[in-house]
């Protein structure tokens, strides 16, 4: 006498593969209506959510399921890094075709579990349903010391603009994947960055704890699309120096600069530092380069300085509604 | 010089229509990478998320957009009610076709905003993207006094099983909607319950504060599908008395009982009460009937008592993977 809904079998599989541990303060969510959790004293809760949709954000035929699992969590956690917070737990909303509830689901959950452990972000619950395409939504719950979160709105005119890492490499990796380089090339660093991005949690936390950044966000849609968002929140403008961008050395400079300006999916941090604090910033943080790429300005325009002069920098990154 | 991504215009519209208030402790989420929030002292955070997908959970041609807005929040909040908690804020993940970013979106947000105010659950952030179908995911963050949450796992054999309200009416309303009764019949109480469900927050909170329920969950997929979940979590079985079900008086008894056993979307509470506490339970709570429908048992089977004897109660409710 089978008295369990088929949906429950899928939910059980998810719990088992994710190493879902039952305890009262977390992880009730799979077995119960909701999960329970408490932040440490003196901390605020940081909340964010992120779509990861087949066809829009990944291609089922191109992206290996373990990379889908890793990346959906990593990119959502990147928003917590961008606040200077620490991720604590996540809710997984998953819709998928019945024929993917076996091997594909297991590999997906394998990648998700690896990310969960690497990023210190535990599964706390979720919702599962059937759909003809894979739809993923991650809600991340983290914590940050009260008053220490770095917002987008704190930059002042005259601050220096910094980015972490190299820009444009993930987009380069995506191009390779589209051309069919695929799994055989998984060892390519650009493809690796596209498939398995690493949110800059340690850097974000360090900048928040030391109050070194006046404003911060993560680069998910490309510098030319994301920078105006930080500037709008801070009621300022910016001037970017093209030659200073930390670009990929894998392609010619002109192409690499375009990728650095408009390429999405890097999940590096974009942050501003007041003149007084610039000298406190190291050239790199645990091996991750920190590069000054421009200055914020009183005018509300976003400008690009090139060898040929100064021109407006128009958003050329990812925009789902364009 | 337009330096704003089109996505940002959609996000702005959402913030404006939802009455998104900027303040540091909440509601950073639309303008920033994540939102900040803190529970009151002595409280735990309650976390849940819920899909609401065109074609799976609602029909764009049948369900008015304001009902979609109301219902997506109300049904997610129902999971917080089922824990005995109070909802505080939500993250809205919304994917929709570009042609719906005008009037449809406004009406949707109107319904969502009404629900947000009625349920005391403020918008705290979200993620928006374009898609050929409307995809909605709600993450709800609430709080509950530490140690007072009512789990699914607390029932003991011999407890009485109760439900709130009337069962099967929402499914009846859906049938009317499918037959094309539509908006002209929006005044029908069954259709009203289908379109604008009211999560039982006050009842859930009252049962939790008084420690009257040993286990609780909300009825979203139908009694025959949901009851086995509560029983599995509590390692018990159950015996339901068919004649005692609080059924709709709008259809013949045989049909009404089927709807009460298997109809989904009621968002009533299902809870268990120990023999010692049954007498403390009123017949109704602020006008909402509370009905004893059976008993939990040591055996792990789910049985239905009818005039013709006792038979197994098989899950016949909503199961996306069936």
Image: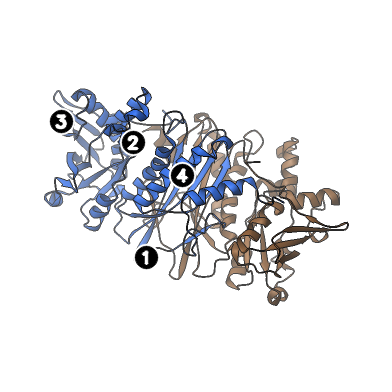
Chain colours: A brown, B blue
Q: Are marks 1 and 2 on the same chain?
A: yes
Callout 1 touching callout 4 (CB < 8 Å) = no
- Residue B109's tag is 4
Number of numbered markers: 4
Secondary structure beneath label 1: loop
Chain letter of disc 4? B
Q: Quadrant of residue B262?
A: top left
Dot 1 and dot 3 within a common chain:
yes
- Give x and y (percent) for residue A277: 68, 75
- Between circles 3 and 4, the one closer to the viewer is 4
Quadrant location of the C terminus of chain A in the rendered image: top right
Q: Is residue B185 above or below residue A142?
A: above
Q: Earlier in the sequence, mark 1 or mark 3?
A: 1
The local crowd at label 2, few if under 14, some if 14 to 19, many if 20 or more residues have their Cα within 10 Å, is many
Is residue B51 something one can see in this rendering?
Answer: yes
CA gap, disc 1 and disc 3: 44 Å
Separation of marks 2 and 4 at Cα, in angstroms: 21 Å
The residue at which mark 3 appears reads as B243
Q: Quadrant of the N terminus of chain A?
A: top left
Residue A206 x/y as whole percent: 61, 69
């Amino acid at each position: 006498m089978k008295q369990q809904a088929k949906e429950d079998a899928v939910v059980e599989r998810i719990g088992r593969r994710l190493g879902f541990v039952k305890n009262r303060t977390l992880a009730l969510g799979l077995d119960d209506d909701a999960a329970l959790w408490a932040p440490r004293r003196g901390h605020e809760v940081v909340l964010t959510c992120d779509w990861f949709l087949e066809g829009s954000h990944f291609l089922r035929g191109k992206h290996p399921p373990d990379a889908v699992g890793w990346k959906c969590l990593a990119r959502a956690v990147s928003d917590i890094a961008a606040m200077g917070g620490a991720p604590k737990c996540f809710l997984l909303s998953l819709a998928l075709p019945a024929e993917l509830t076996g091997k594909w689901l297991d590999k997906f959950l394998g990648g998700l579990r690896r990310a969960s452990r690497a990023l210190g972000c535990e599964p706390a619950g979720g919702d599962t349903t059937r759909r003809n395409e894979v739809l993923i939504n991650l809600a991340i719950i983290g914590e940050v010391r009260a008053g220490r979160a770095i917002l987008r709105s704190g930059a002042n005119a005259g601050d220096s603009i910094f980015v972490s890492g190299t820009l444009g490499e993930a987009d380069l990796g995506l191009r390779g994947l589209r051309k069919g380089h695929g799994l055989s090339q998984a060892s390519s660093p650009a493809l690796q960055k596209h498939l398995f991005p690493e949110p800059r949690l340690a850097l974000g936390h360090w900048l928040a704890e030391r109050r070194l950044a006046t404003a911060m966000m993560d680069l998910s849609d490309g510098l030319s699309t994301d920078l105006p968002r930080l500037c709008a929140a801070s009621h300022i403008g910016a001037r970017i120096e093209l030659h200073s961008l930390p670009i990929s050395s894998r392609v010619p400079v002109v192409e690499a600069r375009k990728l650095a300006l408009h390429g999405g999916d890097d999940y590096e941090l974009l942050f501003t530092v007041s003149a007084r604090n610039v000298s406190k910033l190291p050239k790199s943080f645990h091996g991750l380069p920190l590069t000054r790429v421009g200055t914020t300005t009183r005018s509300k325009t976003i400008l690009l300085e090139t060898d040929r002069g100064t021109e407006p920098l128009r958003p050329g990154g990812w925009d789902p509604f364009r």
